[in-house]
Amino acid sequence: MSIESQLYRIIEGKIAYEGSYIYDPFFAIRKAGNKIYEECLEFIDDDIFDDRQAKILLAEQDIWSGEKEKRFKDLPRIIENQKIEYFKNFDSPIERKQHKNLLEMRLTELSSLSKIRNRYHHLTPEGIASMVMWVTMIDLMYKGENKVGALTYYHRSAISEQEVREIAMSNEWSNYSNLSKTPFRKSPIRMTEYQRRLLSWTNIYKNVRTHTDFPGPKVMEDHDAFDGWLIQLGRKEQMSKAKTVFSSKMKPNTRNAFFMGKANQEEVEEIESMNV
């Protein structure tokens, strides 16, 4: 689907299916779905197949282990760090390519582990509750008869976060959104999730241009490099706030303060930079 087609789908808040439309859920529909989800979790017996049992079953099939579980949990942080390195080396073609390859390897690894880890998620209380939630929501989103087909088609037609970001930077959206401060002509509570995400990224790309450390348009247009810049900026701001809090608690004549943390190699540099 082209950027223009995806943009029209987001603006209209619906997608055609079998002579009718499937409407993207807004707050009221999401709220109804969440209510069903919570009620379903309370109703399901505690003895039902759960996440712990899912891990045991995966281990019995020799496709999961404690090492893989740890790696699965650590990878998101590792990927964040890799994106920062990719951003830092963006102006060096050779190093940029090396870090890009490493990043893609980490993302592929996480995707592979995620597929294995969640193989039996649909059998857990959370998986069952999620299924019931979507069955409830599709009944409110689509008035046709083929509800199951509509739900399957809706998930297959999902717009990824990468695609939303591409749309936010596109000329097609810019030409449309610049005509009005409220392009969707509705309050946030009436917007669909896609509409809110599109506006959020639009504001980020608009505001970042006036930031004192604006990395430049080339970095902004590269999602991984821009993520790296945002992650690094967020960590610096968190560190600055932490320093301010700790400094306010130090005695006036204190010359050295050491901030203690867990011996996690990935956080050592952050902790050491806070020790003044």
Image (cartoon, rainbow, N blue to C red):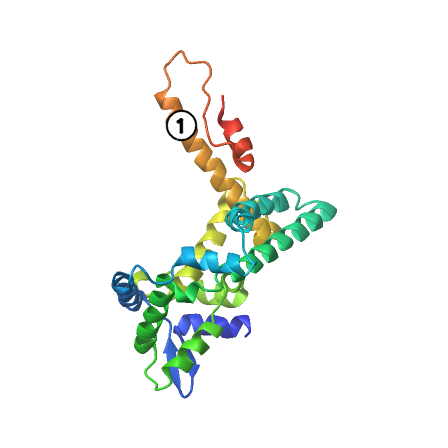
Q: Position of residue 182 (x, y in %)?
A: 36, 62
Indicate whether 5 appears above or below 198. Answer: below
Report the front residue among 11 and 112.
112
Mark 1: secondary structure: helix
Tell me the quadrant of the picture where the N terminus can be found: bottom right
Foreground residue, 203 or 100? 100
Q: Nearer the viewer, residue 274 or 264?
A: 264
Q: Nearer the viewer, residue 63 or 34?
A: 63
Please give the name of the residue rendered at 30% of the width and 59% of the height, measured from the top-left corner. 46
Give how far across and how far down residue 143 sits, in percent.
32, 83
Q: From this viewpoint, which residue is outermost toward the top?
A: 253
Residue 249, above or below 18? above
Residue extending furthest toward the right: 94
Mark 1 highlights which residue?
Answer: 244
Q: Quadrant of residue 252?
A: top left
Q: Is residue 267 left or right of residue 252?
A: right
User: Farthest residue toward the front?
Assistant: 60
Residue at point 57% right, 43% down?
81
Return the x and y of residue 75 as percentages of the image width and height.
Answer: 55, 49
